[in-house]
Amino acid sequence: MLSLTNFDPAAYRAAIKKVLGTLMSKLQEILKQQLESCSTVLVTMDIWSDASMRGYIGLTAHYIVDG
């Protein structure tokens, strides 16, 4: 049974932040290596705002890894 009496949200948040940071670094390196082997990258961008006029930008890139 899970006990929440010893649950520390700050420690949990710090652990998740560390794991996600490590994962992001690894994924960035993989993406960088893949993009270096591509001859072409196609990029699409979309800009919009919500009802409160908060701005958003969507960016999509498509590429084919050679080999």
Image: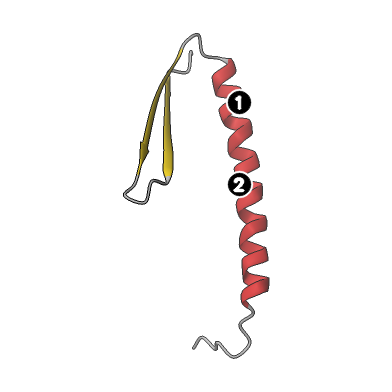
Q: Is residue 7 left or right of residue 57?
A: right
Count the marks: how many? 2
- Which residue is depicted at the point 59% across and 91% down? 5
Q: Position of residue 48 (x, y in %)?
A: 36, 37
For residue 55, what is the image quadrant?
Answer: top left
Which is nearer the eye, 9 or 22?
A: 9
Image spot of residue 14 (x, y percent): 67, 65
Q: Give the answer, above or below, for where 52 lies relative to 49.
A: below
Q: Which residue, given by chain and number where applicable, does mark 2 sit on?
A: 23
Residue ranking furthest to the left: 51
Horizontal side of 16 relative to 58 (left or right) equals right
The picture places residue 23, in percent across and down from the top left corner, at 61, 46
Helix, strand or loop status at disc 2: helix
Q: Amino acid at mark 1?
A: Lys
Give the mark nearest the N terminus, 2 or 1.
2
Residue occupied by mark 1: 32
**Residue 58, disc:** none
Mark 1 residue element = helix
Q: Amino acid at mark 2?
A: Leu
Judge whether 4 appears above or below 50 on screen. below
